[in-house]
Amino acid sequence: MRVLSAILLVTVLWSAATLAQITITKQDVANHYTIGTTYTTEFAPLQGTVNVGNKGGGNTWDFSGFTSEGSSSSTAVDPASTPYIGDYAEANIATMGETESGGVVTTSYSYFHLNGSLDLLGSVSSTDFQVFTILTKTTYAPPDFLQPLPLNYNDTYTTYTQRTSTTEQPPPLRFSSGTRSATQDSISTSASGLLPRPRTTRMPSGRYIRTRGRPSLRVASIRSSS
């Protein structure tokens, strides 16, 4: 099932005079991941096609027909306070999320490194079945290059991801499994425009730039400070 995710990858304050001057900086990303900030992702099955607008400026993206069928939330936390920082020692950003279904609680941590780029180092999810816990750990080596910084409107860049995932269950029902995968994607910040706040989602209104590639669509929120 293909999923359309209303994901705000980076929310930043923008004080530039025109959309063509949009730049996302290292400090913008650091501000976005201020400890204690909570982010919500909403999703639904993608039916048919989505009009993502034209290249260039002047777009208005209308998601008024989008009806969320589920959501998840995560909160920025101090990496040093998390239980798996030893596996991702270079992390200077971390997020934590928790979901519950039928009494089963899953706690997830994601680890990032922010410097000249924003990189995803890995993630860990722990699913507590009360009598046992299943631990799934994902590591990116090299780190998953999410975006260069600063990121400018009309920039083009290539991402390469090599991911290793392992799943473990402790005694007495011990088992382990692992997978490896690699993907490469070409991304361009190819459009800018306005996003009116849809009644059916919690996406904020504001000015946006669109970064697109194959096979994914990523949306970065640029919220005007004026």
Image: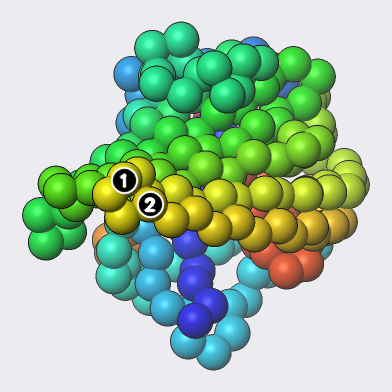
Q: Secondary structure at mark 1?
A: loop
Q: Is residue 205 above or below residue 76?
A: below
Q: Secondary structure at mark 2?
A: loop
Would you say residue 8 is visible in this rendering?
no
Kind of residue sitting beneath label 2: Arg
The residue sitting at the top extreme is: 80
Point 23% across, 47% down: residue:
132
Q: Quadrant of residue 103?
A: bottom left
Point 70% across, 29% down: residue:
118
Image coordinates of residue 209 in percent, x first then y, are 67, 47
Q: Quadrant of residue 78?
A: top left
Q: Which residue is mark 2?
A: 174
- Nearer to me, 82 or 174: 174
Crowd tier of the residue under label 1, counting other residues whose Cα lies within 10 Å: few below 14, some 14–19, many 20 or above: few
- Nearer to me, 223 or 96: 96
**Figure label count:** 2
130 relative position to 208: left or right: left
Point 68% across, 64% down: residue:
216
The residue sitting at the bottom extreme is: 48
Q: Which residue is mark 1?
A: 171
33 relative position to 158: left or right: left
Q: Is residue 50 above or below residue 135?
A: below
Image coordinates of residue 220 in percent, x first then y, are 61, 44
Q: Quadrant of residue 207?
A: top right
Kind of residue sitting beneath label 1: Pro
